Amino acid sequence: MSRKRVAVLISGRGSNMAALVEAAKAPDYPAEIALVLSNVPGAGGLALAEANGIATATVDHTRFGKDREAFERAVQAELEAHRIDIVCLAGFLRILTPWLVAKWEGQMINIHPSLLPAYKGLDTHARALADGATTHGATVHFVVPDLDAGPVILQEAVPVLADDTAETLGRRVLAAEHRIYPEALRMIATEYRLA
Ligand code: GAR
């Protein structure tokens, strides 16, 4: 079995990245985490990746000013240097231009902390609570130029409890994220062949 080479793009603690790294330790998992890339120098997840012997890269977006494409060309150069097949966005807090999204059409996925199309954008847990939602959850989807849009690969719903705060609800959603992201990556990394 040839394993797909995956880059995980992060901006922070990287708990979803860690879930992908753990899943990829299984010998029959169809993908290996070949690169963890952060736009934030010193992001917590980088140390965890290094501790697992995974190559890391930092492309600090502040070095590129307002030139989003120059930043993305530097990201793309890292992805090509590491011969990446699939890109997983995992708390990567940069909006991507159509240029980079088009390069990875069908090969770039994202995890979002809501049941899309509900609650695109930020502060999803607080907004769900403010609306009195009784169900919330997480989504893995293909990345398209529009933010938090694109075909859904997997979703998991969680209940909203009467005494939830954004923090307790967020913890429940995060646990769901850690279940569905490795499963979604398994699905898109698996090559189905007719016998
Ligand atoms: C996760 O909850 C992820 O769904 C969210 O950021 C968090 C990153 O946590 N992403 C977004 O909100 C993107 N719109 P992590 O660094 O521990 O994986």
Image: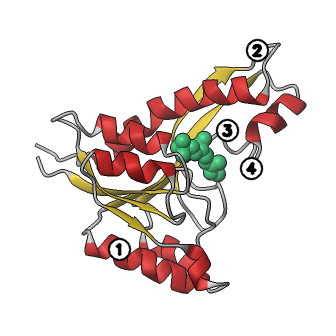
User: What label does residue 78 carry, if any?
Assistant: 1
State whether residue 136 appears in this view: no
| Up/down of 135 relative to 178, above or below | above
The quarter of the picture where residue 20 lies is: top left
Q: Give the image quadrant in which the ligand numbered 1 is located.
A: top right
Label 2: how many Cα within 10 Å (few below 14, some 14–19, many 20+): few
Q: Earlier in the sequence, mark 2 or mark 3?
A: 3
User: What label does residue 114 carry, if any?
Assistant: 3
Label 1: how many Cα within 10 Å (few below 14, some 14–19, many 20+): some
Which color scheme does this rendered protein use?
Answer: secondary structure
**Dot 2 and dot 3 residues touching (CB under 8 Å):** no
Which residue lies at the image location 55% right of the left edge and 84% below the top edge?
69
* SS at circle 2: loop
* SS at circle 3: loop
Mark 3 C-beta closer than 8 Å to ligand 1:
no
Q: Look at mark 2 in the image and give the residue it sits on.
A: 161
Q: Nearer the viewer, mark 1 or mark 2?
A: 1
The quarter of the picture where residue 155 lies is: top right
Horizontal arrangement in the rendering, residue 135 relative to residue 79 (left or right)? right
* SS at circle 1: helix
Q: Earlier in the sequence, mark 3 or mark 4?
A: 3
Q: Earlier in the sequence, mark 4 or mark 1?
A: 1
Quadrant placement of the C terminus: top left
| Up/down of 145 relative to 168, above or below | below
Q: Look at mark 4 in the image and give the residue it sits on.
A: 122
Q: Earlier in the sequence, mark 2 or mark 4?
A: 4
